[in-house]
Image: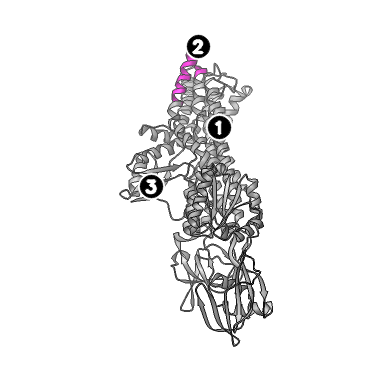
Amino acid sequence: MERVIELEIGGMTCAACANRIEKKLNRMDGVVATVNYATEKARATVPATYSAADLIAVVEKTGYTAAEPTPEPVVATSTRDTLRDRLLISAVLSVPVIVLAMVPAWQFDYWQWLSLTFAAPVVVYGGWPFHRSALVNLRHGAASMDTLVSMGTLAAFLWSLWALFLGDAGMPGMSHPFSLTAREGDSIYLEAAAGVTTFLLAGRYLEARAKRHAGDALRSLLSLGAKHVTILENGAERVIPAADLTPGVLFLVRPGEKVATDGVVEEGSSALDVSLLTGESVPVEVRPGDPVTGATINAGGRLIVRATRVGADTQLAQMARLVEEAQNGKAAVQRLADRISGVFVPVVIALAIGTLGYWIGTGEGTATAFTAAVAVLIIACPCALGLATPTALLVGTGRGAQLGILIRGVEALESTRRVDTVVLDKTGTVTTGRMTVASVVPGASSADELLRLAGAVEVASEHPIGRAIAEAAGRDLPAVSGFRATAGVGVRGTVEGRKIVVAAGAPADADDASTWVSVTADGTVLGWIALADSVRPTSAAAVTALRRLGLTPMLVTGDSPAVAARVAAAVGIAEVEAGVLPAGKVDVVKQLQARGRSVAMVGDGVNDAAALAQSDLGLAMGAGTDVAIQASDLTLVRGDLTAAVDAVRLSRRTLGIIRGNLFWAFAYNVAGLPLAAAGLLNPMIAGAAMAFSSVFVVLNSLRLRGFRSAF
């Protein structure tokens, strides 16, 4: 038996670190692990014989820290403040060193010694995180981006010390011009050592801040739940922590308060603001018997709710879990990038040594050779590669959760690019899934009287048809006695002394697109009522938008051809398959796939689960069943077809950002390394470029925070 273990990883500084931990964990028998550099988490599927402590021990032996996740997200402000302080001190000390090196006219007697005084604390104190990480990696026979940075900055600093104390660079009046390329004849590199350290600290600080913002959406999702709740015990009210709620307990929700957990309304009626959870701005009306979701806000009257699901079983917790799981995924191109970054550092060190030897061998001088080698070490950072996918997933999935769209993983994003056909279930997807009165045909009674008497009997019924008639009849209905319901036949009862029967039946000219019932009083037919599952008001616009995305919509339903044709015509769907049994929906998807189509399936019921699993991309309406949601790739919490449009748009946009990030990261390294090896980059400029590349990738991913619904 297998189980999933999640760990919070500390000490990672680049994608190579995450790749190394992942390799070590996957070498354990039966363990399949992924390590996310952006979220600093590891997720492993392990045999039951392994514990979290076993995995933590492996991570610690690799040179990093690991711990099981805390129940509440902890904001590591002290770590960020330490990094900020280190950056500020380094920046203040580095500016004079860089300015003196870049402006020869300001190079007074012994300026080089002042530069050494300012540069030494930057290289030692400011660069300590890089040096410490390099030492840890060295003890474990490994190398990372910090190894390159530490080697580069220490080489520049130690070369400068040798030149100052043992060479001629310490003589009064020594000066040199600044060059953007590898300079010839210069003997000290203090501005490179201090500047590179400061630039990289700035990049790491900005990266940490940007990554923090990338996870804002998930943190806001996790914080939506109520912290305290008022429960009812023997008629008395008592306030307890929401975490202490148990199923079956009655709790009170006053106007303006959040619903503490998932439950069913026992007393009262109100409108719930669900926008924080689903992105849907229209309040949802609830009354006794209706389900409510935790974290929604009571915008109207007083409600008494019976808790049904608490803690990790609530919809909010499941949403957060789906989002976190999705963020562990990796695109196919990202897996290639991970393999490259895993061998990148040793290759770069070899390239730097080769560059040093080449320039010395060509007679260009040790200064030029040294500058080019240091630039190679510093510019070759795989960080941007490691951040390309996880940061975009972090922002994209978080933004999706805010809009009521749960993306299961990067595989779903890749599927949206290929899909060309979208199969739509009718009931609960294109339609509301709730029966409503479509028309009333009076016989021996007026339409109002017919509906009043039928509603009086049906108010005691739990059948969807009965509820629809009772709703249409309104309130203040006469009392019913002797109520009796016969499954598959109808209901009967006595109203105002008359025996009323509501049963299946239709007039002679009835259309086939509706469900009909007849209403009789003491054996006399009072008339007929037609009921239909109403089309969602937004379905037609959603179908049009799906076409604009290059998708061909198709309606598949178990209803009659007449009903299917009516719904399809109302929303503008040309391809229709009616009278399809649940197993037949799977066959429809398979037939489309056999014809070379890539199929997305949108459904909400148990009968849709198999088709959702068979399709290339499954989208489950969040108001549907748990089994349908588990079989899908995307969950639409809004329960509206417009969410499917936004889901495809967001998925494609996120995948586009991922690809853009990876292109930039690859292009940066492909262009930067040859320039550095050719002696065309000053190490300080290389450091600035390297820091910018990582920040650019994260900032590019943050653009997804501005994604808006098309409706």
Q: Nearer the viewer, residue 492 or 648?
A: 492
- Do we see residue 606 in this rendering? yes
- SS label for mark 3: strand
Check residue 20 in the rendering and tell me which mark sits there, or answer none. Answer: none
Of callouts 2 and 1, the N-terminal one: 1
Q: Position of residue 227 (x, y in %)?
A: 50, 63
Q: Residue furthest right?
A: 446
Indicate which label's residue lies in the foreground, 3 or 2: 3
Say few, some or many: other residues with alpha carbon within 10 Å of mark 1 (under 14 / 14 to 19 / 20 or more). Answer: many
Q: Position of residue 328 (x, y in %)?
A: 47, 45
Q: Amino acid at mark 1?
A: Ser
Could you tell me which residue is drawn at 62 percent across and 64 percent down?
512
State the residue position of label 2. Answer: 363
- SS label for mark 1: helix
Say whether residue 663 is magenta. Answer: no
State the residue position of label 1. Answer: 94
Q: Decide whether the magenta segment is chiefly helix, strand or loop.
A: helix
Q: Nearer the viewer, residue 549 or 412?
A: 549
State the residue position of label 3. Answer: 45
Q: Amino acid at mark 3?
A: Thr
Q: Residue furthest top?
A: 363
Q: Which residues are magenta?
A: 348-369
Q: Quadrant of residue 203?
A: top right
- SS label for mark 2: loop
